Amino acid sequence: MPKPRPLLLLLLRLLIASCIANAGAGAAADLPLPEDTQAPPPSFPGEWQLLHASTGVSAMHMQLLPGDFVLMFDRTDTGPSNISLAAPSPCAAATADGAAADCTAHSVLLDLRSNVLHPYPIATNPWCSSGALLPNGTLLQTGGFSNGDRVARLFSPATGWVELPSFLAARRWYASDMILPDGRVLILGGRRQFNFEYFPHDAAAAAPALTFFPFLDETSDPDAENNLYPFLHLLPDGTVFVFANDRAVVFDPYNRAPLRRLPAVPGGVPRNYPSSGSSVLLPLRPDSPTHAEVLVCGGAPRGAYHLALRNNTFLPADRTCARVAPTDPDPVWAVEEMPVGRVMGDMVLLPTGDVLIVNGAANGTAGWELGREPVTVPVLYKPDAQLGDRFEALAASAIPRMYHSSATLDTYGRVLVGGSNPHVGYVFANTTYPTELSLEAFLPPYMDPRLDGARPRLLAAPAEVGYGEATAVRFALPVRTGENGDTAAEGSAALGEVRVAAVAPAFATHSFGMNQRVVDLGVGRVARVDVGVYEAEVAAPPTPGIAPPGYYLWFVVHAGVPSSAAWVRMRPLGPAT
Ligand SMILES: *[C@@H]1O[C@H](CO)[C@@H](O)[C@H](O)[C@H]1NC(C)=O
Ligand SMILES: *[C@@H]1O[C@H](CO)[C@@H](O)[C@H](O)[C@H]1NC(C)=O
Ligand SMILES: *[C@@H]1O[C@H](CO)[C@@H](O)[C@H](O)[C@H]1NC(C)=O
Ligand SMILES: *[C@@H]1O[C@H](CO)[C@@H](O)[C@H](O)[C@H]1NC(C)=O
Ligand SMILES: *[C@@H]1O[C@H](CO)[C@@H](O)[C@H](O)[C@H]1NC(C)=O
């Protein structure tokens, strides 16, 4: 029998409670619930809200930063954007490309608390680049195009962009970054780069600047690639899962050695740029600390890129998701079907452990003008539901999000959705999919106002924790007044299942959320400390392989309904700082 979903049960309970209230004094208090005849309440399909009609810059890259800022940036060689740099305008910096004077901004920071946008100058071109939030909360961004392809950059709201010219040992364009357990960043791949390197540089003088990674050579399709922006996931034992094209390997980033090769996904569909699918590491659970599962969804059939580019033929996108436990001794891919095919989708991990698949198209591939038939319906994937019952189609957006769109979870549990620009420059008229400057928030089903009665409010969480430390979070549940106005009446807000999820914010671009991660924390005793106020004992993640150091969003999830999050820093191993 499928496990009953707490969300649904809760809805039922709330509905019944309101029925009882409406039935008046004569109603029996213990209304029997005819399980089989009770129609499930219509579920909330989510809701779209427009945060900004124009952020001025199309959000090709997006990163949520501690302090509730969202950095969005594009290329510097598009021509003018729709937002000016603040005076005194450093136009000269923007012309380092040799382009005509451009006094517009190509990066903006959104303050989520005030919804105010701040333009930031960026000196060199970060087009199609990669990034990772460092353990100190500064963003590391690597590579780009032309004058930016060997630049590493640091960004924080206080400093703006700080360039490290020629930091990279190789050009990085369409590479992927991943934070390692020791806080270093692995920078892997990119166009014609079958190698990787690290930030910061290896201190050992004898260490090579670049390490050859033959898997990227072998997975590069002639003339189409289909292995750019490889999907990187850190496994609990500190090894790295790399997916490119239609297959995966696991390697050890410390001795730089390949460890094992997984079987190819049945079907042979390429799933990396330009056949862009997407991928997430499914939530890690405290009761099985050595187990991890990866999900890869969508893509475009082999040959789709050339047919779109040269023959004006837009093949239907792939409809499958493939799921594997790379930590198993003999990993086997399990293939499932999405309700719709999708290329250029974004997969966003939610604090509930579900996965939102959003954005993209039903035909064609990534690349200039090569996508058709926008898929505006987000789909929820429920990893714990029974096979065949895992996908749920949600409310459609009014705005197509094609090539160069992005999506990320925010502090409030919303999914921010922006970008879409399949054109070489900014094109707003006489085109199928105009350059999108808007930023939307998608409210997932758990934001159903009918669930407000169970919605926890996070009152206190630690600012920083060490590995394996015992800590606690405090939260409030709405108190419903009992029949005699007695607030302590135990009929109010019966305590449901309490989970605490630590979510690492992603660097989102080109259908992949780099470093995106949900780590479920071990929850011990949940004590009632006051009317409607609870304290839950929580165990911090045990190792940096499970949760690499840095900033996480901690959400309390009560009966399937998440709170807003608090930022909690996972302190790096080593001497306390
Ligand atoms: C951006 O600016 C261009 C040129 O001024 C204008 O045509 C276009 O409507 C603007 N787009 C948005 C979404 O503000
Ligand atoms: C964060 O770490 C990076 C890399 O070590 C360093 O360059 C940067 O200055 C640090 N930022 C802060 C605010 O300490
Ligand atoms: C290429 O385009 C032509 C004309 O539009 C079409 O007839 C043909 O089927 C296409 N080729 C493929 C392999 O789809
Ligand atoms: C998308 O693919 C479907 C299925 O092959 C096809 O019927 C449809 O014409 C395609 N759409 C475009 C715009 O090519
Ligand atoms: C769009 O096309 C129409 C008709 O061809 C033309 O009159 C108009 O000037 C075009 N607008 C732009 C912004 O190119």
Image (tube, helix red, strand yellow):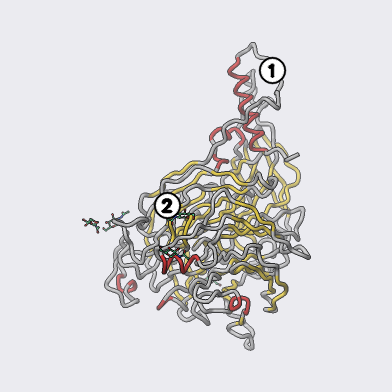
Identified at 57% across, 55% down, the residue is 319
Residue tagged by mark 1?
Answer: 29
Residue type at mark 2: give it: Pro
User: Does residue 136 appear in this view?
Assistant: no
Secondary structure at badge 1 equals: loop
Q: Is residue 564 above or below residue 170?
A: above
Distance from Cα at disc 2 to Cα at disc 1:
49 Å
In this view, the residue farthest toward the top is 26
Q: Classify residue 355 as left or right of residue 545.
A: left
Q: Which residue is mark 2?
A: 400
| Nearer to the camera, 74 or 545 | 74
- Name the image quarter holding residue 90: bottom left
Mark 1 C-beta to ligand 4 under 8 Å:
no
| Foreground residue among 219 and 501 | 219
Kind of residue sitting beneath label 1 = Ala
**Residue drawn at point x = 46 percent, y = 44 percent:** 48
Please tell me how crowded label 1 is: few (under 14), some (14-19), or many (20+) other residues with Cα within 10 Å.
few
